[in-house]
């Protein structure tokens, strides 16, 4: 399975600011995903980011709020824009495996004050 | 009705017990079924992956899928304190399709 790293591992941000989260994979992958996990909750898919195409957002998530870049097959970024306390969450990137499974990074723990 | 349901626990068992974790789902079109383990403040770790119905065994872990009942299970034999974590089931319609996760079951294995 791929080794996935995320930066930053955690951050505390002020309301109204933006944070860009980086996801780096040690091998080339076609499919990358971004999830949100709110405290005590399960994972909710934000968007799918495939290299060479625009990200596909799930219902309830919009590009203006969560812009995503996928410049190559090993890297992606998710920006959380104009943050509010409701954005406090863990943000996780994952990559698709050969059999359709997914492997997750360690997550970025975001607190918005 | 939620698409995937899972008893949130917490479930506490003594060390060495057999643990049974379960998920039910409503969409009969799901084909891929996964179990993830998530330790506190860590990302989910893939434990088991199953396509369609049947059983799959890996060490102390056994995954079962019963598509006729829309029910999947994860069994942990000889449970250890290191198995204490939240267990998430996930399923998808097909290769490359989005995953739907259950809410997770928090397991504590007591020494």
Image (cartoon, coloured by chain):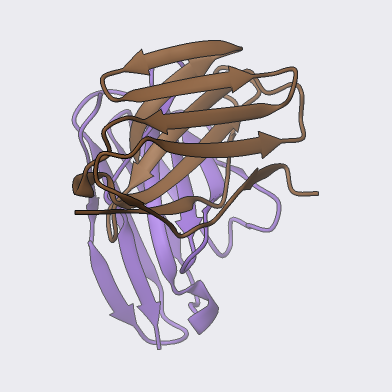
Image coordinates for residue B38, horizontal then vertical, percent: 34, 48
Image coordinates for residue A24, horizontal then vertical, percent: 24, 41
Image coordinates for residue B33, horizontal then vertical, percent: 54, 25
The tint of chain A in the picture is purple
Q: Quadrant of the N terminus of chain A?
A: top left
Left or right: where does residue B25 sit relative to residue B41? right
Q: Residue at image x 27%, y 50%?
A: A106
Left or right: where does residue A80 sit relative to residue A28? right
Output the letter for the chain in brown.
B
- Residue A113 figure quarter: bottom left
* Of A21 and B36, the residue lying toward us: B36
Left or right: where does residue A28 sit relative to residue B51? left
Q: Residue at image x 46%, y 69%?
A: A39
Image vertical order of residue A15 relative to residue B100, above or below: below
* Of B48 and B10, the residue lying toward us: B10
Q: Is residue A5 visible?
A: yes
Image coordinates for residue B25, horizontal then vertical, percent: 70, 35
Q: Residue at image x 54%, y 35%?
A: B90
- Residue B68 figure quarter: top right
Q: Residue at image x 77%, y 35%?
A: B26
């Amino acid at each position: 399975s791929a080794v996935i790293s995320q930066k930053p591992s955690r951050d505390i941000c002020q309301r109204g600011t933006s944070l860009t989260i980086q996801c780096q994979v040690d091998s080339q992958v076609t499919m990358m995903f971004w999830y949100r996990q709110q405290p005590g909750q399960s994972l909710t898919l934000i968007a799918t980011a495939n290299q060479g195409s625009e990200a596909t957002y799930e219902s309830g998530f919009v590009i203006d709020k969560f812009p995503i870049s996928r410049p190559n097959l090993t890297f992606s970024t998710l920006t959380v824009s104009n943050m509010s306390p409701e954005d406090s969450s863990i943000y996780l990137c994952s990559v698709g495996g050969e059999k359709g499974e997914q492997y997750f990074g360690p997550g970025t723990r975001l607190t918005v004050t | 009705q939620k698409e995937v349901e899972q008893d949130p626990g917490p479930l506490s068992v003594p060390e060495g017990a057999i643990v049974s974790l379960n998920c039910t789902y409503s969409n009969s079109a799901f084909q891929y079924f996964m179990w993830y383990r998530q330790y506190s403040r860590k990302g989910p770790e893939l434990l088991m992956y199953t396509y369609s119905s049947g059983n799959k065994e890996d060490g102390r872990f056994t995954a079962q899928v019963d598509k006729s009942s829309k029910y999947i299970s994860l069994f942990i034999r000889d449970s250890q304190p290191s198995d204490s974590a939240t267990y998430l089931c996930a399923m998808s319609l097909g290769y490359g399709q989005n995953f739907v996760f259950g809410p997770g079951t928090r397991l504590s294995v007591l020494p």
